[in-house]
DNA sequence: CCAAAAACATACCTCTTAGTATCTTTTAAA
DNA sequence: TTTAAAAGATACTAAGAGGTATGTTTTTGG
């Protein structure tokens, strides 16, 4: 195998396993040893590709976590079509179709935010960037909806965007505490009502 | 000093310091050693009063964290007066008057939820109880508001309650990422609009 | 005042942690 | 095909983790 490819591959393997373990057990409690055991590689390989655990954490955030949020929550917002309907499908339908695994472990980004968000500026920056991108996409969509008269024009798009994100991240944490979907269904009802209220 | 008093006092000291350190640095990264160093007591004292760190964690949640949520977010909901206005003062005014320290470190409950909420059933139960109490108080208040015709009767009180809690907990996490209040102000605008929308 | 129990201190044990030093193996380029 | 560099493996260190064993001090009740 080519050296570039090989290097990139093992880095990716470490990244993938790290993401999964961080997601399931948290960043702090997942040791480099555990990660490398999962990859079937050794510590030597790890410290050859990553400077330290912090660098790995940042890589997981800005590559894996960011990618995930983009795919699930940001990119869909740039579709054409009824703005309000896009909000509905992105926020409502997506949540409904989540596997139990995802419900039980919450939002990867939110987990990072609440575990290391007040610990290191570097983590803050990486996570903030995702939130800002998400917010910007929402604002663009809502603004469009207001222009096209599907969303009420009197409301601040920025305020709606932040409120939507907050509630979404909040419920993904709270849901972890339960083993049924009741609380999620109640959130979905709440969001549903909210979207109706911002309708033009 | 009486033995009962002394015992209760040191337990309280340990509990207080633990809460602070958990709040500032997280549950997992705060060791028993660090806690006892902060109390100026020793490990022997700790393990005399607490079985293990898990028991301490549960005590902090069900005593300190719960107490805090009750004082700030639940008890105020049982006041008499305009239901919608009570929601406003509890959710809006309280957040506005938060010290920087509280903004930077997020919500103690939310931190616990996202750090250990999917790790141990015992933690889940303790945290769930707080959420359920909060939800119940909100539902009672909203139901009253609907009866008294200050809150729109067509809306599900359960859905509103869960949506309010979700957004609140969500923003308290997200705010940690920033060093200004902009995002908080945007949330406040969003919540403000939301409360206007549920008005009768 | 004295013995027993509770409260607390000291010293330790074992395991895990992040990280380093040094080795072997694989790839690249001449 | 040889040599240098990159990739990876092995073995280690020092610090910190949770927890225990056993000591000393303080309180209590007779």
Image (spheres, coloured by chain):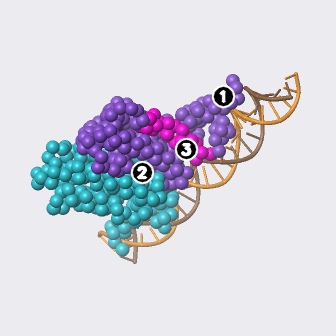
Chain colours: A purple, B cyan, C brown, D orange
Whether tag 2 and tag 3 are in contact, CB under 8 A, the answer is no
Taking the spot 66% from the left edge, 36% from the top edge, the residue there is A45
The vertical placement of B134 against C25, above or below, is below
User: Magenta stretch mostly in which secondary structure?
Assistant: helix
Residue span colored magenta: A52-75
Residue B120's image quarter?
A: top left
Task: Judge the density around disc 1: few (<14), some (14-19), many (≥20) Cα neighbours within 10 Å.
Answer: few
User: Which residue has dot 1 on it?
Assistant: A5
Counting from the top left corner in percent of width and height, residue A114 is at 44, 49
Taking the spot 42% from the left edge, 35% from the top edge, the residue there is A78
Counting from the top left corner in percent of width and height, residue B196 is at 23, 53
Taking the spot 40% from the left edge, 42% from the top edge, the residue there is A140
Residue A186's image quarter?
A: top left
In front: A65, or B25? A65
User: Which residue has dot 2 on it?
Assistant: B174
User: Which residue has dot 3 on it?
Assistant: A57
Viewed as shown, does residue D22 lie left or right of B191?
A: right
Taking the spot 28% from the left edge, 61% from the top edge, the residue there is B71
Viewed as shown, does residue A9 lie left or right of A185?
A: right
Residue A41 seen from this side: no
Whether tag 1 and tag 3 are in contact, CB under 8 A, the answer is no
Which of pointers 2 and 3 indicates the residue nearer the eye? 2
Numbered badge on residue B184: none
């Amino acid at each position: 195998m080519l050296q570039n490819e090989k290097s990139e591959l093992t880095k990716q393997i470490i990244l993938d396993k790290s993401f999964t373990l961080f997601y399931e057990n948290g960043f702090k409690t997942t040791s480099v040893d555990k990660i490398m055991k999962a990859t079937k590689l050794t510590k030597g390989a790890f410290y050859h590709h990553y400077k330290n655990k912090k660098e790995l954490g940042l890589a997981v955030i800005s590559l894996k976590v960011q990618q995930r949020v983009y795919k699930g929550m940001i990119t869909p917002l740039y579709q054409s079509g009824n703005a309000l309907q896009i909000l509905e499908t992105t926020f409502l339908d997506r949540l409904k179709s989540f596997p139990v695994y995802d419900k039980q472990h919450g939002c990867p980004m939110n987990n990072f935010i609440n575990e290391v968000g007040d610990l290191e500026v570097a983590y803050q920056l990486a996570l903030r960037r995702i939130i800002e991108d998400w917010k910007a996409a929402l604002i663009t969509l809502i603004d469009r909806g207001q222009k096209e008269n599907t969303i009420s024009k009197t409301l601040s798009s920025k305020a709606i965007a932040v409120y939507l994100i907050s509630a979404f991240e909040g419920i993904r944490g709270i849901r972890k505490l339960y083993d049924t979907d009741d609380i999620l269904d109640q959130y979905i009802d709440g969001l549903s009502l909210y979207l109706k209220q911002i309708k033009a």
